[in-house]
Image: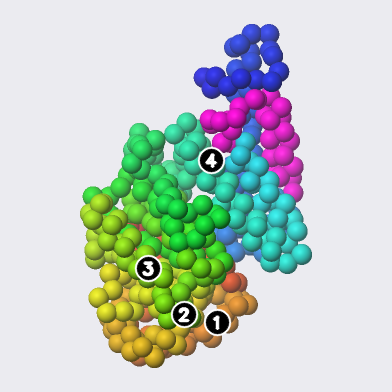
Amino acid sequence: MLGIPMTEKNNTPEEGEEALLGLVTDLLNHWLHVMSLFDQAQIQMADHPSLAEALLPPSASLRAAHLALTKASAATEGPIRELLDGAEYSLRACDGISHHEEGFGPVMKAMRAHCRAQEACLPLSQFMSPVNRYFLDKTASENATILAEVEAKTGNPDRGLFSMDNNRNSRGGFSAFIPERLLPNPPLIIALHGGTGHGADFIWSWVRESRSRGFIVIAPTSSGDTWSMIDDNDTDLPVLLTLVEQIGSRFDVDIEHILLTGMSDGATYSLLAGLRENSPFTHLAPFSGVFHPDIMMSGNLQYASRKPVYLVHGTNDWMFPVDAAHMTNDTLVAAGADVTLRIIDGLSHTYARGENRALLEWFDPCLAT
């Protein structure tokens, strides 16, 4: 029983509870539908006009269900409040996509609102099985054994989403996800956001995979608007190295499988930070970035020898044309790196979420499903 006070009285407490539960179920179903449309659009690289059109009926239904539950419940905290907040962020995301013709700004706001919707509703995983399944990849959500294990451990205070000095108004902190089904010697992924981005948002590119496969993911936030690539004073690398050391020792991380990946400026910085002497990063995976000239000028290109690199770029990238990826590939291969080049037809300058599965299988065969 939810036990949440209502603003409208029913004939009996039981009738009131039943009516409220119906409204919760209705809102939950509409929220999951809208969230799945956003997720599918990311994986299938749908264009914004198509996504906006697909969202029209579902967003209207979500708005109506949100209003109905808001009127019926006086909840200011707890599961119903979390669901209402998640739905509110999803409605903001729908509104942003509907204004895609106004430029990149509304689209970015929509994507960030989609991240906030996930953040608001993740705690519902311990109360609502559909939400628990939503935060697993397709294979895991259909595996009864995995689903039961995750459900049994959901709510463990030592597992889940953690944030250290990483609210969205601050820089230099990090978000981390420690999965319920943590592997005994878990691989570690450090995921770097793009320019002006934030780790609290970028972490959601990996939460579903982390919960499903048992590795740890950390999404730091750069100390400035982007990563330390211009100033000689690199304030970000010491933070990354400290994170690897602290998380590695606490959770007995597999030191043979520490991946540094990133998107756009995060991709560029992943190579700049990862190609160094005694780097703890065993694998690198830059998405939609460029090769920073300082790697060559500093002499650090020599550390590319035998380094596994998973290089991803889109043919429709409007910020860094795809030729940049071919140049990076040629430079790294010439230096002896073990490069896997993935040129994705139709991909613009956006994170290739659909590439996560192949990347994980390349990074560590134990993570294959």
Q: Residue at x 34, y 79 (%)?
A: 275
**N-term-proximal mark, 2 vs 1:** 2
Give the magenta-colored segment's residue range.
56-83
Q: Is residue 84 left or right of residue 360?
A: right
Q: Which amino acid, mark 2?
A: Asp
| Tag 1 near tag 3, CB within 8 Å | no
Q: Dot 2: few (<14), some (14–19), or many (≥20) neighbours within 10 Å?
A: few
Q: CA distance from mark 1 to mark 3?
A: 21 Å
State whether residue 107 appears in this view. Answer: yes
Residue designated by label 2: 231
- The amino acid pointed to by label 3 is Leu
> Which residue does the image show at 73% across and 62% down from the upper left?
100
Marks 3/4: CA distance?
A: 28 Å
Residue 78 in picture, x, y percent from top left:
53, 30
Q: CA distance from mark 3 to mark 2?
A: 21 Å
Cα–Cα span, label 2 and label 1: 27 Å
Residue 344 lies, in percent from the top left, at 53, 73
- The circle on residue 322 is 1
Q: Which mark is residue 260?
A: 3
Most common SS among magenta residues: helix
- In the displayed structure, 337 sits above or below 65; it is below
The residue under label 4 is which amino acid type? Cys
- Label 1, secondary structure: give it: loop
Looking at the rendered structure, the kind of residue marked 1 is: Val
The spot of residue 122 in percent (x, y) is 49, 42
Residue designated by label 4: 121
Tell me if mark 4 has few (under 14), some (14-19) or many (20+) residues whose alpha carbon lies within 10 angstroms of its own. Answer: many
